Image (cartoon, rainbow, N blue to C red):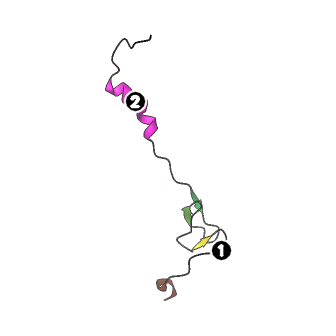
Amino acid sequence: MAVPKRKTSKARRDKRRSNSWKLSLPGVVECPQCHEPKLAHRLCKACGYYDGRQVLGKTQEEKA
């Protein structure tokens, strides 16, 4: 049975584990209607469109 000859140091152990905790960037795409950046597969907060149709109406602030 294989047994480690020396104790693995904390620095060496943590260097090996460092890549498993990296965060990935969210999928940011351009809205086809207003060309603002938005998260993929989500409603555009700027214009209210999703999948080519308006889902969210304009707010009172934008009308005034």
Label 2 sits on what residue type? Lys
Left or right of 51 in this view: 47: left
Is residue 22 positioned above or below 59 on the image? Answer: above
Out of 1 and 42, give the one closest to the viewer: 1
Disc 1 secondary structure class:
strand
Query: If you read the primary sequence from the N terminus, does the residue marked by circle 1 or circle 2 appear first?
Result: 2
Point out the stretch of residues depicted in magenta. Answer: 4-25
Left or right of 40 in this view: 5: left
In terms of image quadrants, where is residue 44? Answer: bottom right
Q: Position of residue 24 (x, y in %)?
A: 50, 47
In terms of image quadrants, where is residue 17? Answer: top left
Disc 2 secondary structure class:
helix
- In the image, what residue occupies the spot 43% across and 40% down? 21
Label 1 sits on what residue type? Arg
Residue farthest bottom in this picture: 64
- In the image, what residue occupies the spot 55% across and 63% down? 38
Q: Is the residue marked by circle 1 packed among few (<14), some (14-19), or many (20+) residues within 10 Å?
A: few
Question: Dot 2 corresponds to which residue?
Answer: 15
- In the image, what residue occupies the spot 34% across and 14% down? 6
Mark number, residue 40: none
